[in-house]
Image: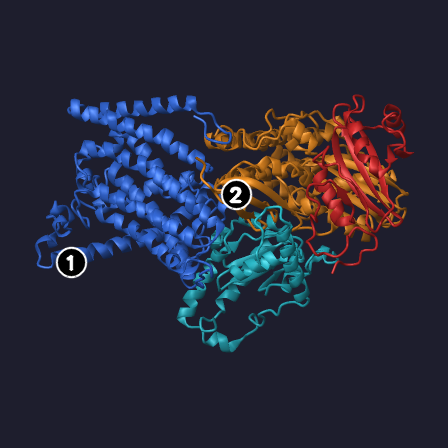
Chain colours: A blue, B red, C cyan, D orange
Amino acid sequence: MPELITVGAAISPNLPWSDWQFGFWIHLLIFGIGIISLLLGSVIIFIWLERRLVGRFQRRLGPNRAGPLGLLQSVADVIKILTKEDIVPSRADKLIFWIAPIVAFTPVVLMLAVVPVADGALLADLNIGILFVIAISSITALGVFMAGWASYNKYSILSAMRTVAQLVSYEMPLILSMVGVVIIAGSLSLNDIVKTQTVPFIVLQPAGFFIFFIASLAEINRTPFDLLEADSELVAGYNIEYSGMKFATFYLTEYCEAIVLSTLAATIFLGGWQGPWLPPIVWLLLKIGIVFCFIVWIRSTLPRLRIDQVMGFAWKFLLPLAILNIFVTSIFVALWPETPAWLMGLTNLAILVAYILFWSKLFKPGGKAVAV
Amino acid sequence: MTVAITGEEVVGALDKELKGAVKSVESEGILVQAEKILDIALCVKNNKNLKLDYLVSITGTDYIDYLEVSYLFYSLDNNKRFTLKVRLENKSNPAMPSLTGIWIGAELQEREIYDLLGITFSGHPNMKRIFLWEGFHGHPLRKDFSNGN
Amino acid sequence: MEIRTDSTSLDIDRHEGNLIKELRSSSTKPVTEPSGWLSEDLKRNIFLTTVDNVLNWGRKSSLWTETAFTACCTFEFISLSSSRFDIARFGMEVLRSSPRHADLIITAGTLTWKMAPQIKRVYEQMAEPKWVIAMGACGITGGIFADSYSVVPGYNRILPIDVYIPGCPPRPEALLAGIELLRKKVEKRSFLQG
Amino acid sequence: MAIKTEPILLNLGPIHPSTHGVFRMRALVDGEVITDIEPVFGYLHRGIEKLAEQKSYRQFIPLTDRLDYVASMNNNLAYVTAVEKLAGIEVPERAEYIRVIMSEIQRIISHLLGIGSFFNDMGTFFTPFFYMFIQKEKLTDLLEMVSGQRLLFNYMRFGGVSHDLPDEFLPALNTFLKEMPAEIDKYERLLKENEIVLARSKKVGILSPDMAINSSASGPVLRASGIEWDIRKADPYSIYDRFDFDIPTGTVGDCYDRYRVRVEELRQSIRILEQAVAGIPKGKVLNPVPLRFRPPEGEVYSHIESNKGELGFHVISDGSDKPYRLHIRAPSLLNLTALRKMLTGWKIADAIIIFGSIDICVGEVDR
């Protein structure tokens, strides 16, 4: 399968430069710069948005002094963090301490390479797009683990251990939740998945979206799964010893991850760039914004779970549900391909509700270990 | 109203057990010998009529000539209270038995008294300074304490 | 020095006791403070460049506070950060518990000699540039507890203080005024000067 | 086959976001599980008991403010009643009513903060805490109206309170009392049945009734273990025997029960306040006592039900104008006695919330 690997072959013919002489390089340049600037720009906006939103949830104003409406707050933060002293603890594992932020940050940016902003407008239209995303996203966990391990700090080691346990566990339901979509769309390419969504897949696959959203909350370490940072327990988590630029990179990674996973949720389940009247990219950004605001809402509302409860939730609740979802979806697709969308969605929703009710009967809160 | 049990009542109730241990009887409590405190505490705790099962507070005081430790007990069921007192004449190296075996509530308070007054409680599981640091000179609540350097 | 890793070990206590004793004997005089910034230090002001202005604007707009609070004044600081006074307006709602990420210590409360090595260590762990606000009477002179055998008479025995805020405890408005003063001070810093 | 593991020594505090001040725990952890823990005290030991011996009786009142700085009126009250008992000072009736009002307002403030920070420890991003702080600020304004201070009030005197309530106080308090029950209901809707709260706090950190009594626990911690012991009922001080209220108790003694008891106590405090506001008489508020007065020789132990538990003052007088010895029975310190037993065997995350559910104030622990 050589064509899978050649990126050059993955340029969509829709783009004007697809048949130019150096089209491939121009493509890389345009989208490379585009993705990075879009990501960094939106990080600045989204950090501001989160702080303002959390402020509103807590009945206060949030940052409003730096620049108009406080929009430059994140810029000020960046300027400050970048010019701060860069400390490397004397007993740290220096090499790994240095590489860890890079290892954590790079894959996050790479994930956007396969996300279309309009029909065919993406860096690399891989026909294994989803697989690529999954494979790349796990590398961030490695970066976080390296940071925790190399810091020579007990809190960061604990945080690193939690990272590995949590991220590896939630990788499973995250992947399996997307399989249902893949079965319906009949393709692994994100561009094709968006194009097949005449009806957003959230209608067809409510259970799939449910699992995907929860698992991605765990992947990006947001409440109620923010065990890696766990302010009240582990002080600051894996980045406890980082300062200056390296800390900024981790801070950035965190928000980029949140944005990228919002993007994926928007692309896979909410119809991506599709939508009437407005240009495709605006639709995509709008959907990303909605998902992100939802994440912020959860962050400012819910408490945190304990590590064994987090693990139990992944393996005992999400994983069986994801498998059930795949099973039911494939039966529909294989046996009755003509099923109307509403029936399929309704069945899926019914399964989700029944499963949650069934599980909540078994669920006994509290105690030393999770009891189901 | 939490009524104070008078010393006479206790002496009356525990006549057999207290033999020889009581030094003097006051209106709200009794003064006993330091060595016998463990037995007496067990008696007042387990006695069916008294049922002094809750150790409220332990106060240590430096009365120039001697050190006094006073224990205050409640009986939660009967809503009564009672005071036990102990005097230690040896001020250079005061020591007495610890009550932690009977009430673990005594643990921190006895450490506090050790720290601030210098009374050693034998049988305490973790007899060391609680508020001040290791290497602090003297015991602040002694009347002859100056500053601790 | 090898220390037994046993949670009840006396070795750790002795080790810490020695640290306290050392610190106590070495800090009998207040630390000299970086003063003169409010008076017209003209020379420095002239050399403030655009780079300086941008840097200082960034620094003053995002003063992240270390959560090293000791006593009563903490509650006035929390009041300041809560919904009513909302310190987040100045971008200061980010409370970092790790000293590596923080820029500012607000010394809210009495400092005892037992606590002093820890506070000093937190200060030393913070990355430059860093600032200290002495909040409340205890932070300035030891306040009502200055006579006590275990209280440090003012944080300036161990840390260089940038701004003093009197009061026992200072009201949130007073604390806000102090922070405003610190922001002014940050503005006057030159990049070349470090 | 068991994996061979090496325990590590983890320092929680004294500078840690959820040790409520400068408390420190030295924990021996095996992975996430705590195998042994030693609380380390004294990071805020200011020597208040020694300072008391150097100050006159009245000069010591402001120092009591700084014990449990969340609820300083309660400390005032405990000290003032102890000295009044020692010297036999009468208090005017209006002053007694004012004292009860202040004490209950402080209880509400303290419990709001206790509940709020408990949820903070559990990992909510400050939201419940700030919601409760909004109500706390309203009460702080009321107290400021009375005393001119926001945190450390120095309001009570021997023989009454320092000055009368301003005219606007009682109407403002009434407004607050009208809207507060609805606020509490709001918190309840948000938090009471939350699955994550249940999962984190139910059956976590159980303190059995026997253990609670044996370890001299008091206040909400004791009541959450199912023991109905409240000094306001058992040994009514001030005029608490005139009010009608219940003692909420728990059944299991876990973190959830301790949280529930605090919420119920908020409602009971509102009940007491309503009755007190309705019944407050007119009259003077202070029976003047000479500035340097000398109580007779003797000793007294006087206690109140403070927000954290039984706050007692053991005052020994030698007839001079300074206390000969003053011992403070601090509920926060004694509630921590069982901490080691409660935490051993639990995970680090549990340890944080168990500690948070005890709700201590380090100023009082270390004094």
Q: Nearer the viewer, residue D265 or A123?
A: A123
Q: Is residue C114 visible?
A: yes
Give left or right: position of D335 versus A50: right
Residue D107 spot, x, y in % from top left? 66, 36
Q: Is residue D49 visible?
A: no
Q: Label 1 lies in what chain?
A: A
Outermost residue toward the front?
Answer: D1
Residue A26's disc number: 1
Q: Quadrant of residue A295?
A: top left
Residue type (three-letter) at the residue carrying disc 1: Ile
Residue A154 spot, x, y in % from top left? 49, 50
Residue A305 spot, x, y in % from top left? 45, 36
Give left or right: position of B13 versus A372: right
Q: Quadrant of residue B44?
A: top right
Numbered circles on residues, count: 2
Residue at left offset 23%, top offset 22% = A343
Vertical comparison of D50 with D92: above or below: below
Residue at left offset 26%, top offset 47% = A111
Residue type (three-letter) at the residue carrying disc 2: Val
Assign a secondary structure to mark 2: strand
Per the image, the residue denoted by label 2 is: D29
